[in-house]
């Protein structure tokens, strides 16, 4: 936690998008909300006036490392990679990984598009945004992959440029720098030097990961709009409804 904020925390609003500005103070993203101190809980409740938390982690992750309870907020669990054939986004997978972490992450981003659990999870998440407008925080373990794609999805629907979307995505590497080093030190005596290098790769994001998700959308659905309607089964005028609510 830095300045009483959760690790990798930021508001993705307040940016220029098509036909206006995405509202600030609505869409908050971070890493897991585990072992938060009182000051951080107060920040989320008083400063952010948080109403709903979306946890994209697996059931195993939420059971072993439950989120700190944040008063007056609703907690929703959406296991994004529950049935994915590749999932290297959790802490356990990062520690256990002994192969090519970069390639494994590319495969994970493909699963963020094609796995049924990801499609169902992101469908629920995106539908909630237009059916129950609230101040939300969405997160996974590191707040970089499952969360990173969700942020990119919101920004794309809002009409943000590809450059703006990538800038927010890559900001994770700066905001997680201290946390990544601390995690690496925690496991230093339990893993080999090669595993440590692979773990550091897995703890960071790379442009190629998000681009792989974009490429997979194009391969599977042809266009982003088709992905929204055929992959996530959102209503045909979803983008218009979203922008009416959140772009000013």
Image: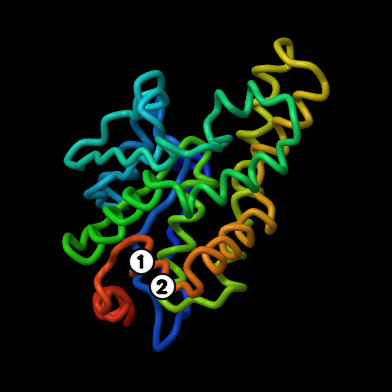
The image position of residue 246, as x and y in percent, is 30, 74
The residue singled out by tag 2 in the image is: 226
Q: Residue at x 43, y 56 (%)?
A: 150
Q: Which residue occupies the extreme top position in the image?
A: 189
Displayed quadrant of residue 70: top left
Question: Could you tell me which residue is drawn at 28 percent across and 66 percent down?
Answer: 234
- Answer with left or right where residue 49 lies relative to residue 36: left
Q: Is residue 35 above or below residue 139?
A: above
- Asked which quadrant contains residue 159, the reply is bottom left
Q: Nearer the viewer, residue 148 or 137?
A: 148
Quadrant location of the C terminus? bottom left
Residue at 56 percent of width and 50 percent of height: 109
Please tell me how crowded label 1 is: few (under 14), some (14-19), or many (20+) other residues with Cα within 10 Å: some
How many numbered discs?
2
In the rendered image of this protein, does residue 75 appear above or below residue 220?
above
- Residue 168 lies, in percent from the top left, at 56, 61
The reply to whether the C-beta atoms of the residues labelled 1 and 2 are less than 8 Å apart is yes
Mark 1, residue position? 230
User: 144 above or below 183?
Assistant: below
**Residue drawn at (36%, 59%), measured in percent from left and top?**
27
Q: CA distance from mark 1 to mark 2?
A: 5 Å
């Amino acid at each position: 936690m830095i300045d009483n904020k959760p690790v990798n925390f930021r508001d993705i609003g307040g940016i220029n998008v098509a036909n206006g500005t995405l509202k600030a103070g609505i869409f908050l993203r971070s890493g897991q909300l585990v072992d938060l101190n009182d000051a951080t809980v107060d920040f989320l409740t008083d400063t952010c006036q948080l109403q709903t938390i979306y946890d994209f982690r697996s059931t195993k992750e939420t059971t072993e490392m439950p989120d700190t309870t944040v008063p007056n907020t609703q907690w929703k669990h959406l296991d994004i990679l529950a049935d994915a054939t590749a999932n290297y986004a959790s802490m356990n997978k990062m520690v256990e990984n002994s192969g090519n972490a970069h390639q494994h992450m590319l495969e994970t981003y493909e699963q963020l598009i094609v796995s049924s659990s990801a499609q169902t999870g992101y469908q629920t998440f995106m539908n909630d945004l237009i059916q129950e407008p609230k101040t939300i925080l969405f997160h996974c373990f590191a707040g970089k992959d499952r969360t990173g794609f969700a942020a990119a999805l919101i920004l794309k629907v809002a009409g943000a440029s590809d450059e703006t979307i990538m800038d927010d995505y890559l900001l994770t590497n700066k905001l997680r720098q201290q946390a990544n080093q601390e995690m690496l030190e925690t496991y230093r005596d339990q893993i080999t030097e090669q595993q440590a290098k692979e773990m550091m790769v897995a703890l960071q994001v790379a442009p190629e990961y998000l681009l792989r998700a974009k490429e997979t959308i194009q391969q599977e659905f042809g266009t982003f709009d088709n992905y929204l309607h055929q992959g996530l089964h959102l209503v045909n005028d979803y983008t218009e409804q979203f922008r009416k609510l959140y772009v000013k």
